[in-house]
C-alpha cells in the first residue's frame, strides 16, 4: 500500500526532472543568439559559446572568471512561462496540471494553481539531484 501511494509522486519528480533538463539544452549564447552556448560564466552568470567566452573575457581580471560547461552549470530554476519575471518555485501535483506542473508563487497563490496541491521545488531540489545521480549510475 505504501509503495502504491508513493509511486505517482516519484513519477512526477522524474517528469519535472526531464522538463528542467530540457530547459538547459539549446541555450543560446548571451552575446549572440545565433550561437549555441557551451560555457557558463559563474561570475557573470552568462551563457557563452567558446568564441564569445574568449572575447568577452579577454582582459586580465576577466580571464580569472570561472567558466564551466553548461551541463555543469549551477542549478537555477527556470522562469515561469506565465510570469517571466518570476522563477519556478513549485510543481503542481494535480492530475489536470500534469502537462505543465511548474509554477511561480503567483501561479500558486493567485493564478491557475490556486488551491491545488503543490510541492516546493526548492525543498525537492536535493531529492531531484539524488535521483539524477541514481539515474546516471544505472
Ligand atoms: Zn565572466
Ligand atoms: Zn557566442
Ligand atoms: Zn507564474
Ligand atoms: Zn495545478
Image (spheres, helix red, strand yellow):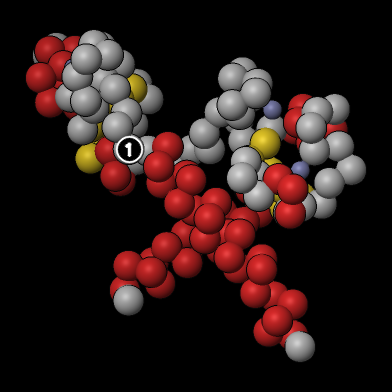
Rendered image quadrant of residue 134? bottom left
Q: Which residue is pictured at 58% across the width and 65% down the height?
A: 11
Residue 62 seen in render: no
In the rendering, at what x and y percent does residue 28 appear? 29, 22
Residue pointed to by mark 1 = 25
Q: Which of 84 and 64 is in front in this view?
A: 84
Residue 24 placement: quadrant: top left
Residue at image position (86%, 37%) is 114
State whether residue 56 appears in this view: yes
Which residue occupies the extreme bottom position in the image?
A: 1
Q: In which quarter of the image is residue 44?
A: top left
Q: Is mark 1 within 8 Å of ligand 2?
A: no
How many numbered callouts?
1
Q: At x 69% / y 32%, what residue is drawn?
A: 104
Which quadrant, please, contains the N terminus? bottom right
Foreground residue among 19 and 42: 19
Q: In this view, does 78 lie to the left or right of 57?
A: right
Tell me where residue 106 appears, x and y as whole percent.
Answer: 77, 27
- For label 1, the crowd category at 10 Å Cα-Cα, with few meaning under 14, some 14 to 19 and many 20 or more, is few
Q: Using the image, determine if residue 7 lies above or below residue 63.
A: below
Residue 45 vertical position relative to residue 117 in the rendered view, above or below: above
Tell me the SS state at disc 1.
Answer: loop
In the displayed structure image, the side of residue 34 where residue 116 appears, left or right: right
The answer to whether residue 10 is above or below residue 47 is below
Pinpoint residue 94: horizontal percent, then vertical percent: 76, 52
Q: Quadrant of ligand 2?
A: top left
Q: Position of residue 22 (x, y in %)?
A: 40, 42
Q: Quadrant of the C terminus?
A: bottom left
Residue shown at the point (53%, 38%) measured from the top left: 77
Amino acid at each position: 500500500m505504501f509503495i502504491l501511494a508513493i509511486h505517482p509522486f516519484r513519477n512526477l519528480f522524474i517528469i519535472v526532472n526531464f522538463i528542467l533538463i530540457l530547459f538547459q539544452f539549446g541555450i543560446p549564447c548571451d552575446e549572440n543568439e545565433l550561437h549555441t552556448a557551451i560555457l557558463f560564466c559563474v561570475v557573470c552568470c552568462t551563457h557563452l559559446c567558446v568564441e564569445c567566452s574568449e572575447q568577452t573575457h579577454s582582459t586580465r581580471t576577466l580571464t580569472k572568471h570561472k567558466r564551466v560547461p553548461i551541463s555543469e552549470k549551477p542549478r537555477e530554476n527556470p522562469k515561469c512561462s506565465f510570469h517571466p519575471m518570476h522563477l519556478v518555485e513549485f510543481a503542481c501535483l494535480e492530475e489536470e496540471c500534469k502537462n505543465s506542473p511548474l509554477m511561480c508563487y503567483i501561479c500558486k497563490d493567485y493564478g491557475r494553481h490556486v488551491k491545488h496541491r503543490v510541492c516546493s521545488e526548492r525543498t525537492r531540489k536535493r531529492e531531484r539531484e539524488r535521483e539524477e545521480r541514481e539515474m546516471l549510475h544505472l
